[in-house]
């Protein structure tokens, strides 16, 4: 009997917290961000340029006024063009202009924890995403191409802030920084390491 009472009280408390969040804004939200990424480690040996070709988007559901779960995807392209040089290959030396690209498309399950209540003027949060990432590797040697298209594990911790456009507004400005790691290994790349800055909008929907 005591266990039944405890279960009932727990459910009432959980629903009460959900109701408190719902009074501010709907628990279901979607978001879209523009992303800039900086390569690190061996990825920087492959392409040392900052990537301005990126975005991320996702859907999220607040379990209560602190914890949220969701699904996130995105895209980032790293690009570098090297001047003409003589490169050694298995079939002999080749003189070519070398162009390198790496296109990164993650699919991550996310968990997020908000550090303040949802009615705050600024809502800082921490989160982590875990899942898989598609790596599309292309190295062009003139008319020749080295290519790889594969899926790898990925993990991505994140810190950020949401700023509502007014008290209780369903629309929020979002800014975050995240680090992404994947054990992707090919040629110059021994693992994928990048830090990504994101800015965009979040919309809570009914």
Image (cartoon, rainbow, N blue to C red):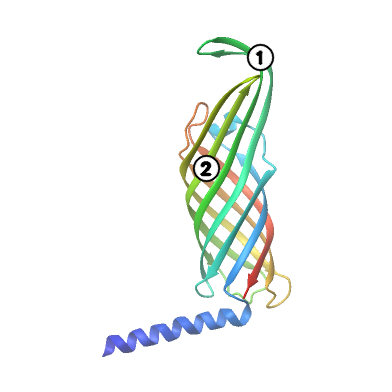
For the residues labelled 2 and 1, the Cα–Cα distance comes to 30 Å
Residue 155, placed above or below residue 29: above
Which percent across, then down, holds residue 122?
A: 66, 69
Q: Residue furthest right?
A: 165
Residue 161's disc is: none
Which percent across, then down, holds residue 128?
A: 50, 56
- The residue depicted at 61 percent of the width and 83 percent of the height is 23
Foreground: disc 2 or disc 1: 2
Q: Residue furthest left?
A: 1
> For residue 123, which quarter of the picture?
bottom right
Q: In the rendered image, which residue does mark 1 sit on?
A: 85
Q: In the rendered image, which residue does mark 2 sit on?
A: 134
Please, what secondary structure does the residue beneath circle 2 have? strand
Q: Taking 96 as reference, is 111 left or right?
A: left
In front: 124, or 85? Answer: 85
- The residue depicted at 44 percent of the width and 84 percent of the height is 13
Disc nearer the start of the sequence (2/1): 1
How many C-alpha atoms fall within 10 Å of the one at disc 2: few (<14), some, or many (≥20)? some
């Amino acid at each position: 009997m005591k266990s039944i009472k405890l279960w009932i009280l727990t459910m009432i408390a959980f629903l009460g917290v959900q109701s408190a969040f719902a009074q501010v804004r709907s628990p279901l939200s979607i978001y879209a961000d523009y992303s800039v990424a900086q390569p690190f480690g061996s990825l920087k040996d492959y392409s040392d340029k900052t990537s301005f070709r990126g975005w991320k988007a996702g859907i999220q559901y607040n379990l209560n006024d602190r914890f949220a779960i969701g699904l996130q995807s995105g895209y980032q392209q790293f690009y570098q063009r090297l001047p003409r040089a003589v490169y050694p290959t298995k079939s002999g030396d080749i003189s070519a202009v070398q162009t390198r690209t790496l296109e990164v498309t993650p699919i991550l399950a996310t968990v997020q924890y908000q550090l303040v209540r949802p009615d705050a003027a600024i809502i800082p949060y921490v989160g982590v995403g875990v899942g898989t990432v598609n790596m599309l590797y292309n190295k062009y040697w003139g008319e020749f191409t080295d290519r790889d298209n594969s899926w790898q594990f990925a993990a991505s911790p994140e810190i950020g802030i949401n700023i509502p456009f007014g008290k209780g507004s369903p629309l929020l400005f979002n800014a975050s920084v995240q680090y992404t790691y994947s054990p992707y290994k090919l040629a110059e790349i021994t693992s994928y390491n990048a830090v990504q800055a994101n800015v965009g909008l979040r919309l809570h929907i009914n």
